[in-house]
Every structure is written in structure tokens, then in C-alpha cells.
Amino acid sequence: MAGPLAGLKVIEMAGIGPAPFCGMMLADMGADVIRVDRPEQASAASGERKRYDVLGRGRRSIAVDLKKAGSADMLLDLVEKADVLIEGFRPGVMERLGLGPDACLGRNAALVYGRMTGWGQDGPLSHAAGHDINYIAISGALHAIGRPGEPPVVPLNYIGDFGGGGMLLAFGVMCAVHEARRSGKGQVVDAAMTDGAALLSAMMYGFHADGSMSSQRGESLLDGGAHFYNTYACADGKHVAVGAIEPQFYALLLEKCGIDDPAFRAQRDVHGWPILKNRLADLFRTRTRAEWCALMEGSDACFAPVLDWDEAPAHPHNRSRATFMEIDGVVQPAPAPRFSRTPPDAPPARGDAAGNAAETLLAWGVDRLAIDRMRENGMQA
């Protein structure tokens, strides 16, 4: 694989959500990632189903029964050749398998050992079950999303699993890799979705401290409180988004909308926002989304159509930048960000344990006799 991370060897202990997202990000950038599946995972995700496992793209796998005697020693042999190991189990699971940080760093002192959990490796909730919605709830992030007087809106699992989880782990891992190349010493990276969701809210906590972000949902600049930073329904039931914060952009939005009402001139008067939102809502319902796009899209009015999963890949801007790609018939986001000198190759679809993973192990410097021993210990490759 080409890309800025070409040559980086990563072991990914298969899981769900954030750890696979981290593995995908590293593989997208050219890292050589071997995913360690459990046998039942490998068989369940074989054939047609693996086409749709977008998070699994870009790497092949080996299937290992981690509870079988000898499996830990087999993986520790692989750890010796790795730069990074990432895992997303509850605290203590890897230790019970004989694959905890002490065991792995004992075999490879320069290893970066990335750990992904919801609550973190310590703290009173560290051993409790949870999901994205729980982790973002205690960070403050979930409270801020929604309309006034209504319950918080669930923002899919972007904030905890992916932004505050897998992406945070990828950042932490690469920080540790950078340091290890200077010091020759590895370390453990403890990435918690609670910490990550809080970190994503850094600006909001600053706004809250200076009084510009209310504790009440849907009353502030960026949470739907402002009429000039909101979404609106159109005549055809589709929606548009406006974000004209700066005065010059706001003035152009009003001009494009044909608004010359003095009431709209007090842009930052929060007391007038509810009324102005209703008036803009009435206005946007007078035309279809396509008509509003023809009038405003591409201008400095800070306007965009709200596109669905089918529409977004077909948008001219996304097509121009190749923001989406198709792999094995499945449309999905392309690797990002872009690199001027070391662009990565297009990632292949997810591999599986039935593929020729032996070639991957050979590329890591594992000899054929060792691969045969791994197979004797229950590895499927």
C-alpha cells in the first residue's frame, strides 16, 4: 500500500465501532493492518456480507481462537514484528487472554498499545457496559443537541464512537508512534469515548464559560437557537441549511431571500431569534429545495442543501473532489485527508480469513514454518 503510513505494521484486535474505525483510518493511509478475528466473526462476515463492512476495508484478517492454549504465544510472536496494537475490549480482557500491555511490551519494548473503551481504563464506571449515547451523555455533548423544551436528539454515533473514539485513538496512536521513533520506547494509549466527547466540546465549554452558550438546549448560536444558523423545510418537504454567521454573509442571505425588513437587522439580538426563525421558516416553505439551490448555492450566503445518503455522493462538489468512491459495488466515503506527495492507494474491500493472509504474514517477516505452527494452534489464514 502507498500512503503516508506505508511501512507501519498494525495488529487490530477485531471489535465493533470505534476500534475498527481507527483500523480503517490507519489502513486507508497505507498502514499494513492485520485484523485478528475470532473464528465465529470470520465465518459470520464471509461472503456477501463482508462487501458491506466499510469499516473493515483495507486489511486482511487471521482468525484465532483466543481462548485456545497457545494462541497468546502465537500472537505475541506477531507482536514482536508490529509497531502498533489496537484493541477495544473492556478493561482486563486482554490481560486475561495473556495479551495485556505488560506481556506485549515485554516482547516488543517499542510497541504502541492502543486501548479503546467507552469509560476509560479506570474510574468508577470503567467496567460498566455502555454505548455511544451513554458516553456522550456524561460529557455534556448530548445535552446540547436538540430543540428547546424537547429531549436531546440522538446524533447517530458520530460523537462517541467515531469522532471522540476511533479518531481520537488514531491520533493518540500516531502521537505515540512519533515519540517511540525518537525514544525507542512504546507506551499504552488509553482512549476513552467520554474523554473524546468532552474534548470535541472544548469550544462549547469556552462559550459556556463566557456566557455566550446557554445551558438551555436550542437557545444559542450553534445549537439551532439562531435564525441564521439553522435548517429549514422547503415546499417539497426537503430541507436546506443556512449558516450565515458573519455580518457580510448574513447581509447576503437576506438579499438573496429578498428580505428588507428592519426586524432582521438586529442579527445578534437573541430575544428576536424565535420570531425571525418562524418568519424564515415560512419563507423557505414557499420554494422547493432545487429552487433555493439555484438562487443561493455557491454564494457567500453560507447555504447548502441537506442531502440524504443517496443524494450526497451525486452532488457535483463531492463528485469533483471524489469524496465518495465505490468498492465492490458499495458506495462509501473515500480516505481523507488528502496528501500532495504521498497519496494512499484506493483501499481494497474487506478481506477475510479465507483469503491469502499468509502473504501478509510473510510480508511481515513471519517465515512459513512459523505460519504452519500458527495454523496448528488454530489460526485460520
Image (spheres, rainbow, N blue to C red):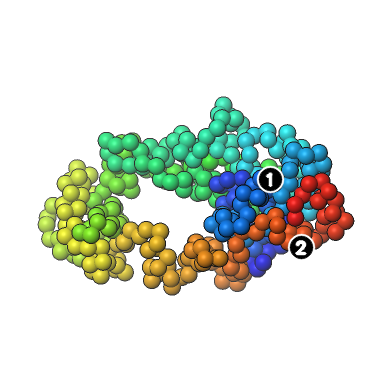
Taking 262 as reference, is 64 above or below it? above
Q: Quadrant of the N terminus?
A: bottom right
Which quarter of the rendered picture does the C terminus lie within? bottom right
Label 2 neighbour load within 10 Å: few <14, some 14-19, many 20+: some
Among all residues in the image, which is located at the extreme left?
A: 261
Could you tell me residue 282's position as x and y percent? 16, 54
Q: CA distance from mark 2 to mark 1?
A: 20 Å
Tell us which disc is closer to us: 2 or 1: 1
Residue at 78% in and 42% down: 72
Q: Is residue 268 visible?
A: yes
- Horizontal side of 157 relative to 123 (left or right) equals left
Is 252 displayed left or right of 171 in the figure? left
- Indicate the position of residue 128 as horizontal and vertical percent values: 56, 30
Numbered disc 1: secondary structure: loop
**Residue at figure coordinates x 20%, y 53% from the top left:** 281
Q: Secondary structure at mark 2?
A: helix
Can you give x and y, in whole percent of width and height, for residue 244 in the image? 28, 58
Circle on res. 359: 2
- Residue at screen point 53% across, 41% down: 193
Say if 54 sits above or below 94 in the image: below
State the mark number for residue 377. none
Estimate the x, y position of residue 292 in percent, counting from the top left: 24, 65
Q: Looking at the image, which residue sits at the far top?
A: 124
User: Residue under circle 1?
Assistant: 38
Residue 83 visible (yes or no): no
Confirm or deny contact between disc 2 and disc 1 (CB under 8 A). no
